[in-house]
Image: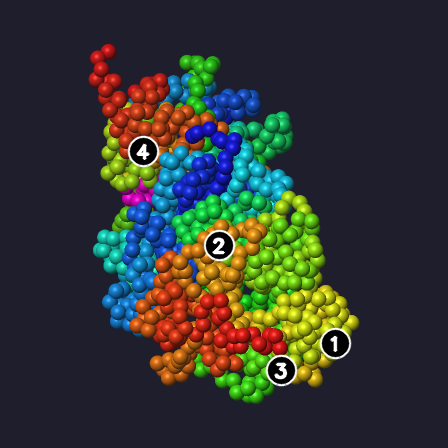
Amino acid sequence: MSCVAVLVDHDRGIPSGGALEALTAARPLAADLGVAVNAVVLGDGELFDAHGADLVAACAAYGAACVHRGRHALLADYGPDAWGAALAGFVEIAGPVAVVAAGTDRGAEAMAQLAARTDLPLVANCVDVSPAGSPADASSGRPAGEAWQITRIQWGGSLLEDVTLTSTLPLLTIAQHSVEAETANSSTTDVDVVDFEPELGPQVRQTLVRDRVTLTEGITLSTAPVVVSGGRGVGAADGFAPLEELAELLGGRVGCSRAVTNNGWRSHADQVGQTGTRIAPEIYIACGISGAIQHWVGAMGSKNILAINIDPEANMVTKAGYAVIADLHEVVPAICDEIRRRRDRPT
Amino acid sequence: MRILVCVKRVPAVGSRINVTDDGQQVDTAHLGFTTSPHEECAVEEAAQIVERLDGDDHAVVVLTLGPEASAEQLRYAASVGGSEFALVTAEGGLDWDPQRTAVAITDAVRELEAAGGLFDLILFGNESADGGNFQVGIRVAHALGRPIVNGIKGIDVGERGFTARRETDAGYEVYELEAPCALGVKEGINLPRYPTMKGRLASRKAQIQELDCAGGADAGGQSRVRLHRPPERASTTVQLGDSAEAAPAVVDLLDELGVL
Amino acid sequence: MSDFPARADCVVIGAGIVGNCLVGHLSDLGWTDIVLLDKGPLPNPGGSTGHASNFIFPVDHSKEIVDLTVDSQHQYEALGLQNTCGGIEVARSPERMEEFRRRMTSATCWGIEAKLLSVDEVVEMVPFIDPDVILGGFYTPSVSAVDSLETGTQMRRRATEAGHLQTFANTEVLDIETVTGANRPRISAVVTDRGRIECDTVAIACGVWSPKLAEMAGATIPLTPAVHQMVDVGPFDALVETNQELAYPIVRDMDTFCYERQSAGSMEVGSYAHRPILHRVEDIPSNEEAALSPTEMPFTPDDFDDQLEQAIELMEFLGDGEIKYAINGLLSLTPDAAPVLGPTPEVENLWSVAAVWVKEGPGVGRLMAEWMTHGYPRMTDPHGSDVTRFYPQDRNVIHIETRADEHFNKTYGIVHPREQWATRRNLTCGPAKARTDDLGAFYFEAGGWERPHWYESNADLVERYGVEGRTHEWDARWWSPITDAEHMHLREHCGLVDISPFQVFEVSGPGVVPYIEKMAVNKCDLPVGRSIYTPVLTADGGFRSDLTIVRLSEDRFRIATGAFDGGRDEYWFRHNLPADGVHFENRTEAVATYGVWGPNAAALLQTLTETDLSQEAFGYGQVRDALLSGIPTQMFRISYVGDAGFEIYCPTSAGLALWDAITQAGRDFELRPVGAGVYGTTGRLEKGYRLMGAELESDYNPVEAGLARPRVKAADFIGKEAYLAAREAPLAAQLSTLRFESLRCAEGYDRFPMGAGNEPVLTPAGERIVDSHGRVSRVTTAGNAPSLGAYLAMAYLPPELAAVGTELSVMYQHEQYPVTVAATGANLALFDPDDSRMKA
């Protein structure tokens, strides 16, 4: 039976958040097309021994009727060529009607590799997809037609682009945070698992991950539930100390704006924005950040935003759900004190 | 060593991007143009790699595809470390679909290599600031039969090729590629230099080779209907206070959101 | 975020340096209900203030600009937001070194410390300047850099803390509403995207956006957005090591129109040398659309390359600096490069506060607050900045852009005081233009009109009267010995002067007598056919104008004023019109005017008319309708040149015929056409006649100018109270005529002071002379007195020096020339002081 195939990108067995979003996004698409959602996961025997069951369970929970496990010694760890070749092999074997992945680093890269190998178009960072033959949509002015009608993001989300896609096999990536990952209502434990062994030439070895260096422990900027971010208003590198303290108290991470990295106050790894990290925390605490668009498109996925700024008219303040109009250098330490006071209070 | 850097001319936009009435392109009436940020870093990286090498038979070749005016980006590259420059003139090329772009660039690389020898390394930006299709470099590399890894934030020159670092949430991954190869780099790999005044003046004399390889590229399967701005997210801001005395209200909010 | 107000006394639009300083000063002067709006965010809403280089060179040749600049420096200093680092202007050409001597003259006049530097002295202060490139420098220790954004913030805070001001940023003005007023539309409300504010007064301080805001109300603010390119280059060890924002004086490389200003470790290089790049207001992006700010437009590097090369010539180390920031910064250019301040003529209670540099911002804030509060500024006479100086034909975009294009590259240029515009000429011409062209007229522009200044056809007179030329090119520029020869010829025979650029108004109606009495110091309610020369005063008793009024009939007066004063005077007369009962009409375009003066004048004209032109029948100051060669005219026996004769008014359509009739008849009377050089300078100076804008300014009153009549009329008039007080008060200054005892310069030839307003009168020892009100004595007019064989000047002097015979000196191009007070008081004439020739 044909399917909409979703590449579930993972890091050594742990699926990315984006992959779950992609599974979520694939469900209505598959329903439109009258086919099932299938997941594709790539690994080697060892990886599947350790994480296979969890991966299958996750795929099933998010609506995959069948999980295709591409199994090969060269898939023990990530490699764009290996993943691209494996995906191409999968397409040959399974004949999906569309292939979807997350717009994550790995999802986007593997899909581009697939697209290059098959010489098929790839539409990146889609936010809305209507397959060919779907009825006209009066609200968006979209006509009915043979081609797929897709809306994707440009400029990091500042613009949307409506495109048509004419392809024998539509390849899509789903823009991160454009859908919220939701488990399927009709999730079933009765999921099919199909293994396949792609043919991988030796040349894919070149791009395998050779080594890994861990720089930070624990939670990361893109997964932190709380991000405390500083902008030009922090004033200096050492001005971030209270922000570090607040982030630590809340189990979050410190981020920053482009102005801060340009001034050399913090490393680029902490930068939130179009050319930095895109985040989606429970709450984003933006301290002394004016809210230029380059920053905003990285932060707009946040579920809640608290802006601390002396300027009530700053962009960040007007866009935030909550604001304190005062000097961050006074407010942030006061919040830290208040948190400590409540925690020390015997309950 | 010969390094090729592929760059794209993009408008230098503000926080609100206007679209022309026909919806086909960004309205650049008020705007200047710049090099797409990842690619600006790619030029810098290439310049730094070459500067670290002994000898002077190295080249940083900068290639772009776009309208005549894209020469401005090549001249800028000339002022910040580029040494040879090639322009594939293609009206509307800034908005070409990724397949078509990749074919034209592949042809251009072949032409450049036929004349000047293989590039040890081809650098792309991870994605362009405007289209953000995340695929042109990979398509070109594949067509040329070269390995490529995207998302690179560090490059070291090795005996037979390059060691590249790719940032992850937890740190970075290390890749080792044999030359000739390609890499897609990301902003943050370096802090690009600014042109010096002398560099700017010298860049006026840079020779730009015009390549005629846009003709062979056919439109791909992805076709633009229109560009438009997403609906503004209306928000009403709840002001929790105007002094440090707002701290309890802030902590109440954190509590309510379950992050305390 | 306070509630948006529904009403305010005054709405100021624009929170740049000017708007902020205006609200601060309005609050100080007692305005208690002010709203400040800006479309952008605070503290930098995105206008020109946000990218200003923020430095101040106080020395200028214009008193008005210096007054505003020095006051601004005092205000920045008082706020602790001024860094006085000194500044050096360097010269690459001999012409510029000569200009520095002129700047030394101005600096002496305004009491600003300054010094000419040798090349070595320049290099000692700024060691990275290449000594081989320059010839010398002009050093001003009080040059400073200021924090204009913080100054604005503090000005707002001052007004806010006084409870007088509410500020709303991110608030866009959508419309400015008016209602029918007494004599023109009047401000009623400002409509914004946050709501509508009813208000009495609106001030537009929106910099480059000002024309768009004015248009909303139906008014015009003539300026155009224009690019000033600026780059920030660095870092440089030599600068980083100083650990200071400004360790070195700011350098202006005057001959390349560039500046180099240290900004901590880097250098800002800015230019006024690139091609003029003008924009339209609608081309300026919004804050959201702009990559940087709306007025920091995309840099166009091709336009700046020459400047980069020149900067490297001057300071070689700049070449290795990285260009970290480069903009096409927008600033405001007006048709004549001066600010546009004051009440707009089109809409009552709508004020223009635009085209102001950071160096003048706080001063303009004070000046405008005084203007809006007291009806006219007190700190200085603003006539050079007064927005009403522009005529309607000066307010269209073609004129604004063409003139801005012409003067942009003169920003650091050497501009001669008599310099004429090259563009937008021949637009308004007298009816005899074809004839004056044939006579080789050399035209000066006068209020948009082409006015013959001398005639090449009179070149033969130079030899006849033995007129000498001028040795120094600067003195001889925009000047001709023919003027002196024409003067002699008029005195000996007679001359015909085309004075069609005169601004002619008529006021009429049942309420006209009380109206005209209110406007004029001297009594106007005289018999029909009589004329009145009268000052027009500000409420504070200073000069707002001087003009001639003629009673044409019981209920009709004609007002004639100078070609340069028509805009301001028309505004003032219209502004004071009652709601009904008086009709105002500008007749300038309808009326041609000639002057015929000299010993032969009456006899000549008598051949053309049956009207008896004898003194007995047609006395001085009288006006008669007369047919001249069958052409209906009004003849007015008056003279500004000191010889008997008439001003003759006729319909413009008959102007050419009248010119021909007079010149034809003139053949028998040795008549020559005579240019405005005689009319405006030589003739009037010999007679000691005062000129608005030169001798007459709001800083001085009629008593000081020697124009007070023995008695004061009973009728009330504007400024009467102050005028009466001035008559009683001890005299602080007295207008005087000075005679140059020698014009010989150190080089051994004669120099000729310009009387451009920047030449100080000094004691013989070279000390500045300042009166008890703080006003400096300076030459207001200077020129030849050909009939006396003398060179004269006029100046206000403190009473102890205003005595005939006092020996003083005048500085010109940084040299002192001895003068003697030759006349003082009411009669300043040295030629025919008894007016016997006028009565002949």
Label 1 amino acid? Leu
Viewport quadrant of the N terminus of chain C = top left
Q: Which chain letter goes with mark 2?
A: C
Q: CA distance from mark 1 to mark 2?
A: 45 Å
Around disc 4, counting alpha carbons within 10 Å, would you say few (fewer than 14), some (14 to 19), or many (20 or more)? Answer: some
Nearer to us of marks 2 and 3 is: 2
- Where does the image place residue C565, in percent across and percent down from the top left? 56, 60
Q: CA distance from mark 4 to mark 3?
A: 82 Å
- Where does the image place residue C151, in percent across and percent down from the top left? 36, 45
Same-subunit check for callouts 2 and 3: yes
Label 3 amino acid? His
Residue that badge 2 annotates: C723
Q: Which chain letter goes with mark 1?
A: C
Residue that badge 3 annotates: C493
- Where does the image place residue B200, in percent across and percent down from the top left? 39, 60
Nearer to us of marks 4 and 3 is: 3
Q: Which residues are magenta?
A: A257-265
Residue that badge 4 annotates: A327
Chain-order first, disc 1 or disc 2: 1
SS at badge 4 = loop
Q: Is residue C319 visible?
A: no
Q: Residue C608: which disc?
A: 1
